Amino acid sequence: TGGIVSLSGGGQLSGTGKFDVSGSTTVGTEGWVLGGDFVKSSGTLTISQTDLKLEGHSTLTSDEALSFVNLNLNFNTLTLGSSTSDLTVENAITIAQNTEGISTGDADLILNQYQKILGEGSITSTGGIIYLQEGGELSGTGKFDVSGSIWTLGDNFTKTSGILTMLQTTLKLADNSTLTSDEALNFVNLNLNNFTLTLGSETSDLTVENPITIDSSGEGILTGEADLILLSSLNMSQGLLGSTGGTWVLIKDFLKSGGTLTISQTDLELKDSIKLTSDQALSFVFVTLNLNNFTLTLGSSTSDLTVQNAITIDASTEGISTGEADLILLSALTMSNGLLESTGGAIKLAHDQTSKFSENAFMMLDETLLTSDNGIGIAFIEIDGEPDLSMTDSSQVSYITLSITSGTAGSISTAGGVDCLNNCTGFIETGAYGFNTHGLYRKVTSANFMLSESSGERKTATLAVKLLSRPLNDVQVILSSSDLSEATLNNYLLTFTPSTWNRVQEVTITGEDDDVSDYDVRVRILGYTDSIDTNYASTSAIKTHAFKYTFTNINDDLQKGVSPIVQIGADQKVNEKTRVILDGSASYDPDPTGRIVAFKWEYIGQRTDVTLTRESESIAYFTGPDISETTVMSFGLEVIDDDKTASYGSTSITIEPVKEISAVVSGGIEPKYPEDITLDNEETASDGSKNLQLISGTSTFLTTLGVAMNLDGTASSSLKTEDNSSGEQITSTTKVNLPLGIDLNMNKDASLSISKELDGNVFLTTNISSDGAVTVGVSTNGIGPNLKAPKGSEVTIATDGTSSISMPASTDSTSGITTQVVSTLSPDGSTQIEMSYSGGSGRTANADGSSGSKSTLSTDSGLSVAIDTSSGVTASMAVTEGTLGTLAASLGSDGISSTSFDAGTSKTTFSSSISMNLQ
């Protein structure tokens, strides 16, 4: 009942023997002192209020549990000899020396006080339970090995150093506990047991191999800034799961049907394809999502996922399947492979950022809203190449701007009632041709739809084709040539599948050679679709999505003289809804006696809102269409000389969407300029007037366009050019003065387009090109004069539409005669051109140039006459559209006036060296 019981050599208790050391504690005594192994196989061992002290390394084996008040290892190791030798110690144990330790084997060890494993001490187990009722700590070079065991934790445990071994270990909580470690923790099982586990530092990463269930209100895991790696599923119906940093690494599904989930500043990494399901909307919020070649599925309509950083999907096995949940991306998405699919909810892309789809990216959105993350700013989508992108089943679009990279033809297939809610740009203009549209994208690359019998640039053309929507079944595009002796195809049948509908296929069209002088032959290339899919099906009577292109195969077996030379003005960049001038008047026939007998302008494209006026004249025009995105249009010009030899040329017109400068006063002029540029200067004076400036060009040739908006609502403009191509700067300024009611457009290339609609279907236009040249026209129902003037001219348009053009004076270097030309175009279409002569030294035999004289040329209204005042004055007009001949008149800068009529087979000319008035 007290004192010391010392078994220096150990001992054994068996049979019905009794060993009672009750009351033998170290308070004044040393209790039970054991110096060797002790085995109890039967009998009665009484150790109430007993201490155990070791005098040597000892093994304690018992057929029943053991309990001591204190355990003094005394620099020795205590080994528990069997699975029934469970040991409980009520007071704290000091385990600090390299020879001190407890080896439990398969027995349980229950330590009722806070346990320190210091220095080189150790606790090791290969089975059973290690229960730290008040927690503990591991430091120094101590060892704590709970492999194959159940580690039960009743309070906080901290590891700052030492060796913690947890092979095949289960962690079980006996109370809310914080586990802090300087290295990662790994458990086979985690038994929360109605309590909450908190990870105490960012280094306390936790891996759990088997499924976790959180199904009690008191249960939970708070990871803080540590990583959470779950190798199996997690099911949460109550309790708490939270993170404020680190990374969640998931291999199996995550299901939350109740409880509270809080995530902030945390990354998500997949180690396998998984499903995230939550009953708590907007609960999944991660900083970074690393798909790691796997697919993430959102399991319900409330399983919304928010990702803050940019996402890259670039492997075929990667993807996000949102189901009916929302996917909210706060940074750009880049997809070159993999999938993005949704059957409801919303895909919200980062506003003011560009998400890119390219190569083998696959997107399928059914009954889905595609919008920006905040529903106010614009999210940009760029398609590079031909990724497989589709929207179906009443999906909607809002606050999205769609674009394609240069030289590509990607699109988003829309079908089944897809609609735009608000601010959708590019879905029509970039190849989709409207929502829910089925058909063919086609692009022809050719030399102005010309083929040639001989080798060279015109020998072949290419036709690129793809579908505009994903079909339900394979679709065939059936092609043919109307004359195989003139044009053949390398492929007459193209097949598109539901997975290749968006991939362009190219057909080569080849001009066939023959030995026949058969002139130039026109050939039609025809095509249509056929499929089981009703959107692409054809019948014998109706060919669905049929198209036709007409090519001309240029004959190489006949040449009559030298071909005419086609000269067209430079490519233009003009504003939408402006009058665009197509000028081929500089074309000519190089044959000594040759002449141009016919012009034919043609729009090369598929738009139906382009109408050419005067397409059979050297100068034609059209009104730019109303667009929402920059559009490039091509026009071809065929020129035929008197040998019936044709030449061809083309020009490109870029049409730009515009924005408007507000007028100085109500009803005043409101200049327009392209919406994708910023004016080089926009200045409002103190009196309210405005000055605008747009600069274009290079250091070799620079154009500066200025517009002054006056207080009375009128405006004036000047276009200054600086030509440095010769090494010496040559400048000129062209001016125009404008009344109220004028439509004024500042074009991207710094040219100026002016128009005014007058009474009686009369249309007045003035164009100043970026090189300063002026074209003024008045037309009634497409009939009227066109007048060209050189750079440096000044145009004044009166309120009634009368245009006065004053040219800068010029002096002939040979004769010394100075000429001044003033032209007037009236709203009724009549013209009056006056050329004044001065100076010189006897420019003619009958007139003294020094005294000054005038010659005039006038035209009546109702005539389509072309007038050029760039070098002298010339006017020409086709009589009965050229069937009778061409009437021409000129006032030369040398003082000679002339008229002529060319009937085709003969030409009659009258000229005079005195002042003339020609009408």
Image (cartoon, rainbow, N blue to C red):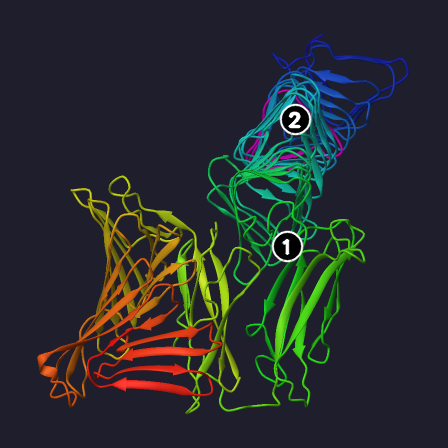
Instruction: Specify the segment rendered in magenta.
Output: 137-166
Q: Is residue 869 left or right of residue 845?
A: right
What crowding class fits label 2: few (fewer than 14 Cα within 10 Å), some (14-19), or many (20 or more)?
A: many
Q: Amino acid at mark 1?
A: Pro
Q: Which residue is mark 2?
A: 73
Q: Nearer the viewer, residue 320 or 215?
A: 320
Q: Earlier in the sequence, mark 1 or mark 2?
A: 2
x, y percentage for residue 358?
A: 60, 55
Image mark for residue 387 = 1
Q: Which is nearer the eye, 623 or 37?
A: 623
**Which residue lies at the image location 60% right of the left edge and 67% below the top edge?**
444
Q: Could you tell me which secondary element the residue under label 2 belongs to?
A: loop
Q: Does any portion of residue 170 appear in the rendered image? A: no
| Res 402 visible | yes
- Residue at (41%, 78%) from the top-left corner? 886
C-alpha distance separating marks 1 and 2 = 72 Å
Q: Is residue 134 left or right of residue 317?
A: left
Q: Are marks 1 and 2 in contact (CB under 8 Å)?
A: no
All told, the count of numbered labels is 2
Image quadrant where residue 487 sits: bottom right
